[in-house]
Amino acid sequence: MKETDVIKTFKENLRSARLAAGYRTAKEFTDAFSEIPYSTYSGYENKGIWPSPDNLVKIADAFNISIDSLLGRNTVASEEEAKIQKAITLLKTNGFFITDLPEQKSIRIGRPVLFRTSSTKTGKKVTKEQKEDYLNFYSKLPDFSELVIPYDEVMDAVNKSVAKTKEARWNNDRFEKNKENQRRCFQAFFCAYIAKTRIKELNKILKASPNGEYESEEDKDLALAVSLWSEFIMNMINIHKVPIPKTYDDFE
């Protein structure tokens, strides 16, 4: 591989790793991670300047990614890592709050938040500052809808949801012409794939229970989380007309 190709790969991987870690801009990252100045980090990502070994280690640790992945040394493991990070980035950009759990090969994720482009009260466009204020407020609240989902299931649900959203865009002007509705569509499909599996698990637990009730706190927490995801899905079906069967029975 030529040196120019190495530099290009490094710049692309560095930017992808930053986005996957939840930092929308380089400035946002360096504001949160004070060990590397913005001007220095910006040179790495935009100009292809090579970081010192110490800074390379710091960046890899901050983004929870291997140095090999940043440099594009694509082992099978790093390729899989890149795929899950891409899926996580897609989920974050579609309103999901996510904590990556690489040691468990899972993510912790709650039901999504959808921002309107304009206020329902004033009709004015929602500003970036208003959106960030709401995000900061929301992120500090306890989220009873959080679930821990294995990477394999995340990848499968993301891929299916992307395909289903494209299908909805082809068949319905409502989703073809409106980006906000497309995000709703993707959110609802992803939630339905995740919820359907856990609804089956909960039904088995209830059938096996002598009292027909959830006996462990873990099962009760799961039932609450799934009920919140299901509530979100039903709103997407009833209010925003996302094409998912209400019982999920025919949903694949």
Image: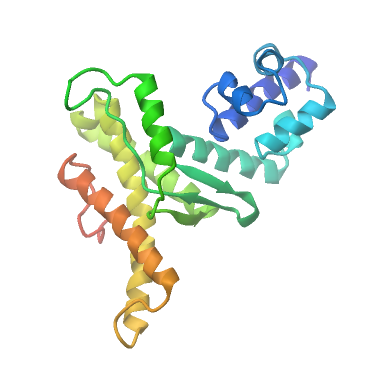
Q: Report whether residue 73 is seen.
A: no
Q: Residue 99 location in percent, x, y?
A: 53, 46
Q: Is residue 125 left or right of 97 when viewed as pictured?
A: left
Q: Is residue 64 left or right of 50 when viewed as pictured?
A: left
Q: Residue 42 location in percent, x, y?
A: 66, 15
Determine the residue located farthest toward the right in the rendered image.
Answer: 53
Q: Nearer the viewer, residue 236 or 33?
A: 33
Q: Report whether residue 59 is seen.
A: yes
Quadrant, the N terminus: top right
Quadrant, the C terminus: bottom left
Q: Is residue 77 left or right of 234 when viewed as pictured?
A: right
- Seen in the picture, residue 55 relative to 235 is either above or below; the reply is above
Residue drawn at x 69%, y 46% is 77
Q: Residue 248 location in percent, x, y?
A: 26, 58
Quarter-of-image position of residue 78: top right
Residue drawn at x 82%, y 23% is 52
Residue drawn at x 65%, y 28% is 33
Q: Residue 132 location in percent, x, y?
A: 41, 27
Q: Nearer the viewer, residue 3 or 70?
A: 70
